[in-house]
Image (cartoon, grey):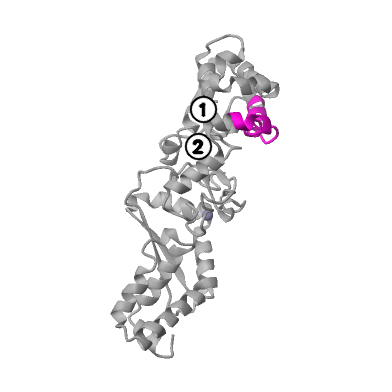
Amino acid sequence: MHNFFTQLFAEISAAYNHPDFIHPDFQTIIDNHEALNQKLEAVFTAYMALAPAGKAQVQQAYSNNNNIEQVCNNTVRPVKFDELPAGIQDPLKALYGSKGTLYQMLTAKDNYEAVKNKCGSLKGHFEKFRGQNPISVCPFCGMENLMTEYEDGKNEYDHYLSKNDYPFCSINFNNLTPICDICNKPGYKGQKDIPFQPNTNPQIQDELYDPYSIAYPEHVIDLKINSTSTDLKDVDDWTLSIDCTPIGNVRKKDRWLEIYKIESRYKGKIAGDSYKWKDRIVSKYALRCKRKGIPFADFKEDILDDFATPLKWNNGILMKCFDEFIMNDLNCEANLSGTIF
Ligand SMILES: [Zn+2]
C-alpha cells in the first residue's frame, strides 16, 4: 500500500496502470484480484480529480496518521476520515472499509500464502512479539497473560488508532498490537478515538503511550492500596493510588487509565481475589515462621520478592501491590501471629 500511495502522491502517471503503482512483489495478487485493482483505481481517479489543496490534505493525512510515535506525543495531529475531502471518502471506504476490506482480500485463501511469503503473517508477528518480549501479560492492562508463541492460536490484534477513523494506518504494524479480550471490548478500549480527549468539542488532542516506543526505559507505574482494613471486598471502603515516574509521563498515564478503565478493573480484581492472596500469606506464615521458626524479617523479604518481576505473572502487578500493602503494615507480624488478621 505504501508503494501505491507514494506513486500516487508523486503523480507518476496521469492514467492508472497497476504495474506503475503496485510494488513488484504484489503484482500477482493484483493480477488475480480485479476487485482489489478496481478499488485502487477508484482511489487513484478520486485523488487525481482533487484540487491541489485537497491533494495536500490527503497527503498530510497519510503522513500524519502513519507517524504513530508523534501522534502519541501530541506533536502531530492525526487527520480523521471525515475530515478528508468528500470526493475521496467513498473510494477509501471501499478500499479499507468493513465490507471487502483490503485486509480481507489480502488474507483471502488464494492470496494469503503469497502475502505471507512477502510480508509475514499476523501469527508470525505474534510469535516474534511473544518470543522477544519478556512480558507475558497484556501490554495494555498488564493483568492477564497473552497466549504463548507455542500455542496454535494468537490473541486478537488491536488497531491502536482505530481503523474507522484512521484507515491510512490500519495495516501499519506499528499500529497493530496484541491485546487481551477485555481491553479489546467495546466500553473499554474497543474502537475509541484515542488521540483525542473524550467529550470535548472541538476535540482536544492529548498525549498517549506509544505501544512500540522504547522511549520509556525508566517509566514505572506505582500502585498503592490505601485502606485501614485488610478486608477489601467493598471497593467503596478503600482507594488505589496509581502514580507514575517520571512525572513528565503523567498525561500519558492518565489517558491510559481512562481509555482502558484501569482503576475500576484493578480494584475489582483486588476486591474479588485478595482473600485468596491473603490466605496464601497466612498459610505461608504458618508454615515458615510458626512451624519452621524462620524470622519474620526473612519471611517478609521472601514474600515481597515473590513478584519481583510482576509482569511475568497473571495479575502479578496486583498481587505485588497487595503483598506490599499487607507486609509493610507496621502491625503485620502481630496480625499474622494473632487472631485479628
Ligand atoms: Zn488487557
Is 134 in the magenta?
no
Which of these two is toward me, 164 or 328?
328
Mark 2 or 1: the one toward you: 2
Which of these two is toward me, 16 or 86?
16
SS at mark 2 in the image: helix
The residue that disc 1 covers is: 62
Tag 2–tag 1 contact (CB < 8 Å): no
Q: Which residues are magenta?
A: 91-114
The residue that disc 2 covers is: 173
Instruction: Tell me the quarter of the image containing the N terminus.
Output: top right
Q: Where does residue 61 sit, x and y in percent of width and height?
A: 51, 28
**Label 2, label 1: how far apart the Cα atoms are:** 15 Å
Which of these two is toward me, 102 or 207?
102
**Which residue lies at the image location 41% right of the left edge and 85% below the top edge?**
286
Whether residue 52 is visible, yes or no, is yes
**Which residue lies at the image location 67% right of the left edge and 27% below the top edge?**
90
